[in-house]
Amino acid sequence: MTINVNNQSQSILENSSIKKLLEQLDILPNGIAIAINNEVISKEKWEQTMIENDDDIVIIKATQGG
């Protein structure tokens, strides 16, 4: 299945949840926010929210500055 993650095409396994996507992309779940098709998904819903073919996903990582 093909999706867009931060404007880059990615191939992922079928029947992937947000949680599984993060595992496949080797991204730690702390300090990030995720939106699918311009809708922010709360962290509590990551395990049950399924990703579909051609979804547009944005992953935002919190950074510390100063």
Image: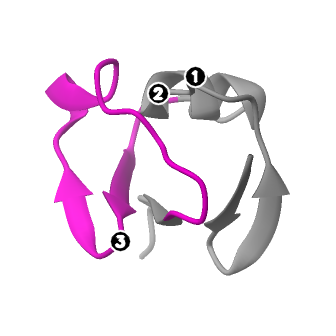
Where is residue 7 drawn, in percent x and y?
67, 81
45 in magenta: yes
Q: Amino acid at mark 3?
A: Asn
Mark positioned earlier in the residue sequence (2 or 3): 2
Q: Residue furthest bottom?
A: 7
| Residue type beneath disc 1 | Lys
Location of mark 2 (residue) = 17
Q: Are marks 1 and 2 in contact (CB under 8 Å)?
A: yes
Question: Would you place residue 2 above or below residue 18 in this image?
Answer: below
Q: Between disc 1 and disc 3, whose residue precedes? A: 1
Provide residue 1's location: percent of width, then percent of height.
74, 46
Characterize the local packing of mark 2: few (<14), some (14-19) or many (20 or more) Cα atoms within 10 angstroms: some
Q: Magenta stretch: give its range.
A: 29-55
Please name whichever residue, 15 or 64, is drawn nearer the observer in this view of the structure: 15
Q: Which residue carries the number 1 mark?
A: 20
Are there few (<14), some (14-19), or many (20+) residues within 10 Å of tag 3? few
Q: Which mark is residue 30?
A: none
